[in-house]
Amino acid sequence: MLNFELEEVSRFTLDSFPRSCDFFEGKIVAGCRNGSIYIIEGETVTPIMSSHFDGEVWGLAVSSEKAEIFATVGDDNQLKVWNTSEHRCINSIVLEETSGKMNKPGQGASTLAKTPPN
């Protein structure tokens, strides 16, 4: 982060590129390309939200044991587990690291996602 004289006053790392930023109550709020939102204060970065970020969400399953737990899967090639009581994603994995065979136009699911394996 730079001051008005363009001197570095702090440094922090995010797990994706910021798409939008705002300044609120002395803190920076950053929305990133991967669907995460962070509050940045000095060198402290606090994640406050995550989401699917590319294409559509294709699946949702509610836990049969705990109604406040559910899972989603989407075009972004991620499986995410959510807790509605905590209002947050509690786990996330990338399903496949590499791209698979491309479908011909008109065959398979319609998607605008650019995330592998699409």
Image (cartoon, helix red, strand yellow):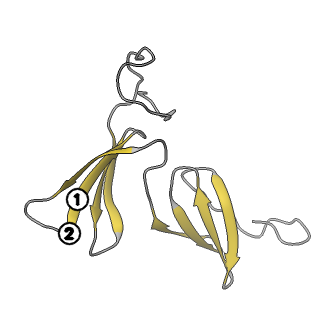
Element on which disc 1 rests: strand
Element on which disc 2 rests: loop
* Residue 72 pos. (x, y %): 29, 51
Q: Quadrant of residue 65?
A: bottom left
82 above or below 5? Answer: above
Q: Amino acid at mark 1?
A: Phe
Q: Nearer the viewer, residue 21 or 8?
A: 21
Mark 2 sits on what residue? 68
Q: Residue furthest front?
A: 106
Q: Tell me the tag on residue 56.
A: none
Q: Amino acid at mark 2?
A: Glu
Mark 1 sits on what residue? 70
Disc 2 residue crowd, few under 14, some 14–19, many 20+, Cα 10 Å? some
Q: Residue at x 28, y 70 (%)?
A: 84
> Is label 1 in contact with label 2 (beta carbons under 8 Å)?
no
* Residue 108 pos. (x, y %): 35, 23
Q: Quadrant of residue 98?
A: top left
Q: Residue at x 62, y 64 (%)?
A: 30
71 above or below 74? Answer: below
* Residue 17 pos. (x, y %): 63, 50
Task: Give how far apart the Cα atoms at labels 1 and 2 are.
Answer: 7 Å
Which quarter of the image is occupied by the N terminus?
bottom right
* Residue 109 pos. (x, y %): 36, 29
